[in-house]
Image (cartoon, rainbow, N blue to C red):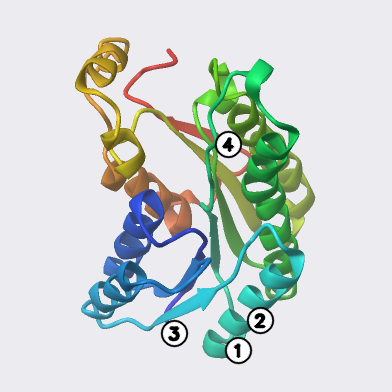
Amino acid sequence: MSKVALITGASRGIGKQIAITLAKNGFDIALNCRKETDSVIETKREIEEYKVKCLIVEGDVSKYEDSESITKKTVDEFGKIDVLVNNAGITNDMLLIRMKQEDFINVINTNLVGTFNMTKNVASYMMKAKSGRIINVSSVVGISGNAGQSNYSASKAGIIGFTKSLAKELAGRNILVNAVAPGFIQTDMTNILKDEVKEKIVQQIPLKREGTAEEVANVVKFLASDDSSYITGQVIQIDGGMLM
């Protein structure tokens, strides 16, 4: 029987690439997005070319009721969830002095509370199965911080603490919990930056280039595989040496 992976925020960028990479490796896929779009439908078609099953599940992970529904629909369709990838996230960058409380709360609710909501619901199924992988997408700014991103950095740092705590709680049920911390990765969000801004960032990276969504997805693929069977509570930086 194929393994099943549920990926949140899978409509584009890193989430989409994670879904495609896992599908290439034989996983049936549940694609979560807030609303079904042409992009998600196209991703579903791409995934099904690898002769695996794919389900689109709409829902806002920041809402607990939605996370319950996302989980239930996935289990109803596939009978289980072997891998949960908490990728859904938003940014609303601004210096603290100009940041409204709602700008802080909205980012925390999607990125950190959303990770809690999905993990709490999926973990109950994994505990019964005494098996599972939970992979949380953090960021290097959750480790280093970044001016203008106090909300985003706080949410991603929270994910790291959440990952380590949960890894200790769930290890006895053979559920492995890890995080990845991407650095400067080429996505729609980075493509809008001016060339001189991107070049300045790249010069701070020992490998002297942006990372790719595929490089992030390949690490997630490893953590989702049987090859990672003795790894839990870890945060793997995918940053070209940026934070060395």
Quadrant containing the N terminus in the rendered view: bottom left
**Spatial CA span between label 3 and label 2:** 19 Å
Q: Nearer the viewer, residue 96 or 221?
A: 96
> Would you name the residue on which mark 1 appears?
76
**Spatial CA span between label 3 and label 1:** 16 Å
Quadrant containing the C terminus in the rendered view: top left
The local secondary structure at tag 4 comes to loop
Q: Is residue 126 visible?
A: no
The relative height of residue 237 versus residue 220 in the rendered view (above or below) is above
Q: Which of marks 3 and 2 is nearer the N terminus?
A: 3
> Would you name the residue on which mark 4 appears?
234
Q: Is residue 233 visible?
A: yes
Q: Earlier in the sequence, mark 4 or mark 1?
A: 1
Residue 106 position, x and y percent, is: 67, 44
Question: Residue at (55%, 69%) from the top-left corner?
Answer: 82
Query: Residue type at mark 4?
Result: Gln
Front position among marks 3 and 2 = 2
> Would you name the residue on which mark 2 appears?
72
Side of 228 relative to 214 (left or right): right
Query: Residue type at mark 1?
Result: Asp
Q: Label 1 near label 3: C-beta < 8 Å?
A: no
Q: Label 2 near label 1: C-beta < 8 Å?
A: yes
**Spatial CA span between label 3 and label 4:** 28 Å
Query: Residue type at mark 3?
Result: Met
Residue 172 position, x and y percent, is: 76, 56
Front position among marks 4 and 1 = 1
Side of 224 relative to 100 (left or right): left
**Spatial CA span between label 4 and label 2:** 28 Å
